[in-house]
Image: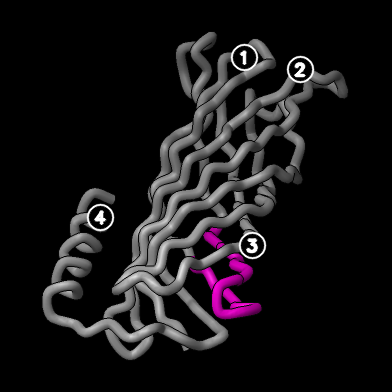
């Protein structure tokens, strides 16, 4: 991820020094980004579970309702997570999580060479292939949580742009065993991503 951010900063510097920025336009914007997923885990079950940090590719598409307002859908492939228990002192299984995020955004126009934006919306995450404690512990499979977003697009040329994006989500899934609730597992991830996109 450090290399991705260095790449984005270098491209931004080159753009400022050598490109005459034109106001980007078009109803659609697509991006491909590298994302760093960093969860802040709070386990209310007493199992002492934690989750891994992950780096993965994500794809998003935005549709502009007006010159300044858009809706964005962000997708990534299902990610495998290894669960570690501080109580057991060992890995206790794994699961897959598939995140989908929908946000409404306001893009700030009129700034020379850059277009920052803020957003808010909803994250949907589906958990599957859960094998915690050899199947003795189950997870709530479908969860929803709020998301806040902050980002920056830097137009380069002919609709192409460099993007940096930060999302913070608040997510909670319930754990159970033998039909009895064990408590909630909060992940509350911070997702920092950088990449390229094109508006048309």
Name which of mark 2 and mark 4 comes first in the sequence: 4
For this view, does 38 lie left or right of residue 74?
left
Q: CA distance from mark 4 to mark 3?
A: 25 Å
Q: CA distance from mark 1 to mark 4?
A: 36 Å
Q: Label 3, on which residue?
A: 104
Q: Position of residue 65 (x, y in %)?
A: 65, 78
Q: In this rendering, does residue 56 appear at all?
A: no
Q: Residues within 10 Å of mark 1 (few under 14, many from 20)?
A: some
Residue ID at (47%, 66%)? 108
Q: Label 1, on which residue?
A: 47
Q: Label 4, on which residue?
A: 5
Q: Which mark is residue 63?
A: none
Name which of mark 1 and mark 2 comes first in the sequence: 1
Mark 1 in CB contact with mark 2 (< 8 angstroms): yes
- In-front residue for pair 18/176: 18
Q: CA distance from mark 1 to mark 3?
A: 36 Å
Question: Which region shows up in magenta?
Answer: 59-77
Instruction: Examine the rendered structure and indicate whether residue 195 appears above or below residue 170.
Output: below
User: Which secondary structure lies at badge 4?
Assistant: helix
């Amino acid at each position: 991820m450090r290399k991705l951010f260095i790449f984005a900063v270098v491209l931004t510097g080159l753009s400022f020094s050598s490109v005459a920025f034109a106001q980007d336009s078009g109803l659609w914007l697509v991006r491909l980004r590298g994302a760093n997923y960093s969860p802040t885990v709070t386990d209310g079950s007493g199992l002492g579970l934690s989750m891994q940090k992950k780096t993965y590719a994500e794809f998003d598409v935005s549709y502009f309702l007006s010159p300044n307002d858009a809706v964005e859908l962000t997708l990534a492939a299902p990610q495998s997570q290894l669960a570690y228990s501080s109580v057991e002192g060992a890995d206790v299984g794994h699961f897959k999580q598939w995140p989908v995020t929908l946000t409404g955004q306001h893009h700030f126009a009129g700034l020379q060479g850059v277009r920052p934006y803020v957003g808010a919306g909803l994250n949907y995450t589906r958990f599957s292939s859960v094998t915690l404690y050899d199947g003795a512990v189950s997870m709530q499979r479908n969860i929803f949580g709020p998301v806040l977003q902050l980002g920056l697009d830097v137009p380069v040329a002919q609709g192409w742009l460099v993007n940096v994006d930060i999302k913070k989500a608040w997510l909670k899934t319930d754990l159970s065993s033998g039909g009895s609730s064990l408590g909630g597992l909060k992940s509350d991830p911070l997702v920092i991503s950088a990449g390229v996109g094109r508006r048309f």
